[in-house]
Image: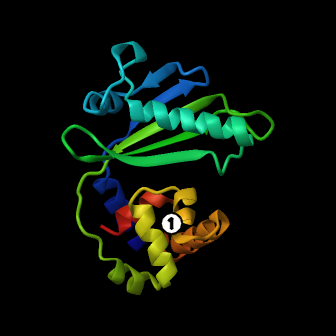
Amino acid sequence: MKKMDSFTGIVNKRSLPGTLIFDLNNRLLYFNKEAEEMISDLPVLSRRQNRISKEISNIYNELKKIKKAKGFDWKANFKSRVLKNRSELPYLIRAFFIGGNKKKSPDHIMVLIEKILKKHAIDFEKARREFKLSEREVEVMRLICRGLANKEISKKLFITEYTVKDHLKKILRKMGVTSRSQIITSLK
């Protein structure tokens, strides 16, 4: 029952994400009402570009460049960043490939935009004690909460991306959650 209460708490703390789906030729194929509302508050490139903000275009293009330079890897091809809109409230933007399968590369990119509802201090020391985290795991968790990707975390902490992934797996296991966003919401 505790797991279900925890899950319900996570869901109640989250807003509905704005969802955009693009083909690999930069054409916007789908967006939901939440995305349209959020994007109208984000810096816009031009009306010609389907009112997509510069940051969304940047994260989309970075993801395509990674695929072009390094090939496709289901686990590695993911980008995220936190940005502020005109009212100074932060958003989390995540982009990843969808479609395709193990034999065929994906043919679409999904961009999720989530409002970060409340900004308040996280008691990392309490989390360290409660979940029995190491000091390094807490450092990784702090950077995850700031919206950094594995590569950015590895550079900040002077460790390999593989080591970051290893710490992330341990954090997820110890906290009993399955995603980065669940880490963040369970700390609030």
Image coordinates of residue 70 in percent, x first then y, are: 73, 43
Image coordinates of residue 185 in percent, x first then y, are: 36, 62
Pointer 1: what residue?
Answer: 156
Image coordinates of residue 90 in percent, x first then y, are: 28, 48
Above or below, 170 against 44 in this view is below
Residue 133 visible in the snapshot: no
Residue 23 visible in the snapshot: yes
Which residue is found at the position 57% from the left and 74% from the top?
A: 170
Q: Classify residue 68 by image quadrant.
A: top right
Q: Could you tell whether 140 is left or right of 32 in the image?
A: right
For the residue marked with disc 1, what is the amino acid?
Lys
Q: Residue furthest left?
A: 87
Q: Classify residue 37 by image quadrant.
A: top left
Above or below, 20 against 89 in this view is above
Above or below, 53 against 181 in this view is above
Above or below, 43 against 186 in this view is above
Q: Could you tell whether 101 is left or right of 129 in the image?
A: right
Q: Residue furthest right?
A: 103
